Image (spheres, rainbow, N blue to C red):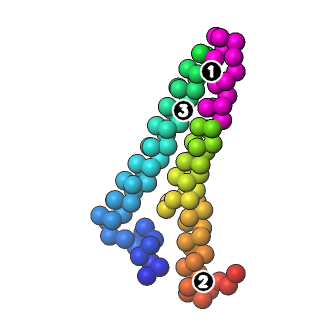
Amino acid sequence: MADELHPSSERPDRLERLARRRAGAKMGWYIHATVYVLVNLFLVILASSRGQNWAMYPLLGWGLGLLIHGAVVFFVAPGGNLFDRLLERERKALRGGDRW
């Protein structure tokens, strides 16, 4: 069962679907980051032109959301470094080769 979770042991069509899903998730993050930069740049310019500093609130709040989105896409989701390391650790534990 553990081998079914590893991308290299999957059929080519399942591997293709996984690759497309991972690429789509990463593309979604890049689009999110681009919109974040453009909108917040506009808000900073708008607030600065009026001598105010309220633009830092959406910048920080949305920035936290972007950070969490990136962490999920690049570290936690299948294909991320953390996910791969945990998956390999579980495989070893199930085979009896590694005890925490």
Q: CA distance from mark 3 to mark 2?
A: 42 Å
Q: Residue furthest bottom?
A: 96
Residue 15 lies left or right of residue 71; in this view the side is left
Q: Is residue 31 found left or right of 76 in the rendered image?
A: left
| Proximity of marks 3 and 1: CB atoms separated by less than 8 Å | no
**Mark 1 neighbour density, 10 Å: few (under 14) some (14–19) many (20 or more):** some
Crowd tier of the residue under label 3, counting other residues whose Cα lies within 10 Å: few below 14, some 14–19, many 20 or above: some
The residue positioned 54% from the left and 32% from the top of the image is: 36
Say if 42 sits above or below 80 in the image. Answer: above
Which residue, given by chain and number where applicable, does mark 1 sit on? Answer: 44
Q: Please state which amino acid type lies under the numbered disc 1.
A: Val
Task: Tell me, yes or no, whether the highlighted magenta stretch contains residue 83.
Answer: no
Most foreground residue, 39 or 23: 39
Q: Which mark is residue 93?
A: 2
**Residue 8: x percent and y percent?**
42, 69
Q: Which mark is residue 36?
A: 3
Disc with the residue nearer the chain's start (1 vs 2): 1
Q: Quadrant of residue 6?
A: bottom left
Instruction: Please tell me which residue is depicted at 49% across the width and 62% down the height of the picture.
Output: 78
Q: Where does the image place residue 9, in percent across and percent down from the top left? A: 40, 73
Q: Up-down: is 57 above or below 82?
A: above
The mark that comes first in sequence, 3 or 2, is 3
Q: Which one is in front, 38 or 19? A: 38
- Residue 97: x percent and y percent? 62, 86
Q: Which residue sits at x=69%, y=17%?
A: 52
Is residue 34 rendered to the left or right of residue 12? right
Q: CA distance from mark 3 to mark 1?
A: 12 Å
**Magenta span:** 47-60
